[in-house]
Image (cartoon, rainbow, N blue to C red):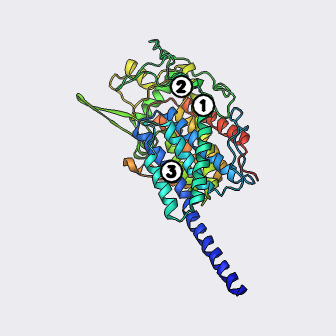
């Protein structure tokens, strides 16, 4: 009889173990995290978030997800609290509570993603799908409830912290004053939009001590009178490249355009086309890195988080420099002094030229992804296919960042020096993030 009861107990334990393994195969799958980040990316695209604000959407959502992972696996991951100096300690899981930390991580990402996007609640339907997926996979009710409760408490803590980053204050800050003086930025066609987020340099960074911590040299002085001046040669270099684009260069420019809101004007009619911005593109690349290296769920979350922090800080640093330099765009100079009908290949964005934002954030993201997944990881990026743009292949994340930088010159919206300095600045920011954030315990 004792042997029979022991056999029954073993069978019950085995069934229970199988059920647990079944639901964890679903909730611990890194592909589910990649899909969840892409879901936020789609919402950012649909709602026309400017690139700098999009970076804020991604960073807080990813940090919330990561903090859940660090709480659930403290032997292998460190909390960012304290590593990010102003970040307070996050709630710890209650002892004795059985929590699926990967599932809770997904929910925390969505909770914060809901709160930092508009219309608020854009991810509610997707959250319901995640919860149903866990239930359908056999997650026990107590594990489900414990996971939801913990994810909510941690996400709320991240939201309280996020509200102190000066974002709300910059919503009512003064608008940019356009000064029509040679060498200074002025609005460009076809939108002639006002300067985008002139106070973004006042946002609280994550790893940088301040927006000005990594300075850039002064841009070449405006000088179109001297054909031997650096500025004149830079202008003519841009014009020459745009006027003689090869098929591959055209593909490169279109691939890295990442214009979240392009205004198309045909006669008296106008309409907008949307893509994800630079931050969203690099979130996609983080997903590619995760997939091609077969990274597990926790490694995947950590890599996305580190990349999003680098991108966020890179935008703050870059925007500070942009509104210190207030440099004129190539289109303005060429239209005024060389050819009034000349147009860049891609639309000039509404903010000063120096330094290149895409160069800075691409280099910063590439350094963190190299740290997370390794160097010289060749990959093909098909994330632009949804916009009808064929894939491109790269030898490494750094190779992609260099091409992203140069695409802005061939696109006609940046001088090469702004891209070169932007790349150098981004590398420094990425290095700093890698050095300061010791996320994985080796």
Residue carrying label 2: 168
What count of labels does the image hold? 3
Q: Answer yes or no: do the residues labelled 2 and 3 have beta carbons within 8 Å? A: no
Q: Which residue is mark 1?
A: 421
Locate residue 187, reporting x and y percent.
41, 21
Image point (57%, 37%), residue name: 361
Q: Residue at x 55, y 22 (%)?
A: 169
How many residues crowd around disc 3 within 10 Å: few (fewer than 14), some, or many (20 or more)?
A: many
| Above or below, comparing residue 100 to residue 262 in the picture | below
Say which of 69 and 243 sits in front: 69
On screen, 365 above or below 269? below
* Residue 347 spot, x, y in % from top left: 39, 32
Which comes sooner in the sequence, label 3 or label 1?
A: 3
Would residue 34 appear left or right of 67 to someone viewing this image? left
Q: Nearer the viewer, residue 247 or 36?
A: 36
Q: Disc number at residue 36?
A: 3
Which-is-in-front pick, marks 3 and 1? 3
> 407 or 432: which is nearer to us?
432
In the picture, residue 204 is in which quadrant?
A: top right
Q: Quadrant of residue 322?
A: top right
* Residue 352, image x, y percentages: 49, 23
Q: CA distance from mark 2 to mark 3?
A: 26 Å
Quarter of the image containing the N terminus?
bottom right
């Amino acid at each position: 009889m004792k042997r029979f009861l022991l056999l029954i107990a073993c069978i019950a334990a085995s069934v229970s173990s199988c059920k647990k393994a079944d639901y964890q195969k679903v909730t611990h799958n890194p592909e589910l995290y990649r899909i969840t980040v892409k879901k936020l990316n789609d919402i950012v695209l649909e709602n026309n978030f400017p690139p700098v604000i999009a970076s804020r959407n991604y960073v807080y959502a990813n940090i919330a997800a990561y903090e859940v992972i660090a709480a659930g696996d403290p032997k292998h991951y460190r909390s960012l609290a304290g590593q990010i100096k102003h970040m307070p300690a996050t709630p710890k899981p209650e002892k004795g509570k059985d929590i699926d930390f990967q599932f809770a991580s997904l929910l925390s990402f969505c909770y914060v993603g809901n709160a930092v996007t508009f219309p608020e609640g854009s991810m509610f339907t997707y959250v319901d799908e995640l919860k149903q997926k866990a239930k359908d996979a056999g997650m026990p009710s107590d594990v489900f409830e414990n996971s939801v409760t913990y994810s909510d408490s941690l996400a709320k803590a991240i939201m309280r912290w996020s509200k102190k980053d000066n974002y709300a204050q910059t919503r009512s800050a003064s608008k940019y004053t356009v000064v029509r003086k040679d060498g200074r930025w002025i609005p460009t066609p076809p939108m002639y939009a006002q300067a985008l987020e002139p106070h973004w340099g006042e946002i609280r960074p994550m790893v940088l001590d301040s927006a000005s911590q990594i300075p850039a040299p002064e841009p070449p002085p405006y000088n179109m009178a001297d054909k031997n001046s650096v500025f004149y040669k830079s202008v003519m270099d841009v014009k020459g490249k745009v006027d003689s684009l090869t098929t591959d260069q055209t593909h490169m420019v279109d691939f890295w355009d990442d214009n979240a809101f392009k205004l198309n004007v045909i006669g008296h009619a106008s309409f907008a086309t949307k893509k994800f911005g630079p931050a969203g593109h690099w979130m996609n690349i983080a997903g590619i890195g995760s997939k091609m290296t077969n990274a597990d769920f926790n490694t995947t979350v950590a890599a996305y988080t580190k990349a999003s922090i680098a991108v966020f800080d890179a935008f703050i640093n870059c925007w500070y420099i942009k509104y210190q330099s207030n440099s004129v765009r190539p289109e303005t100079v060429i239209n005024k002094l060389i050819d009034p009908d000349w147009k860049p290949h891609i639309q000039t964005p509404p903010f000063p030229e120096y330094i290149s934002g895409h160069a800075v954030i691409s280099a910063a993201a590439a350094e963190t992804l190299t740290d997370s997944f390794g160097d010289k990881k060749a990959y093909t990026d098909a994330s632009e296919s949804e916009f009808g743009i064929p894939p491109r292949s790269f030898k490494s994340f750094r190779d992609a960042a260099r091409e992203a930088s140069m695409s802005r010159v061939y696109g006609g919206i940046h001088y090469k020096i702004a891209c070169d300095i932007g790349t150098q600045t981004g590398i420094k920011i990425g290095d700093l993030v890698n050095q300061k954030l010791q996320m994985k315990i080796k």
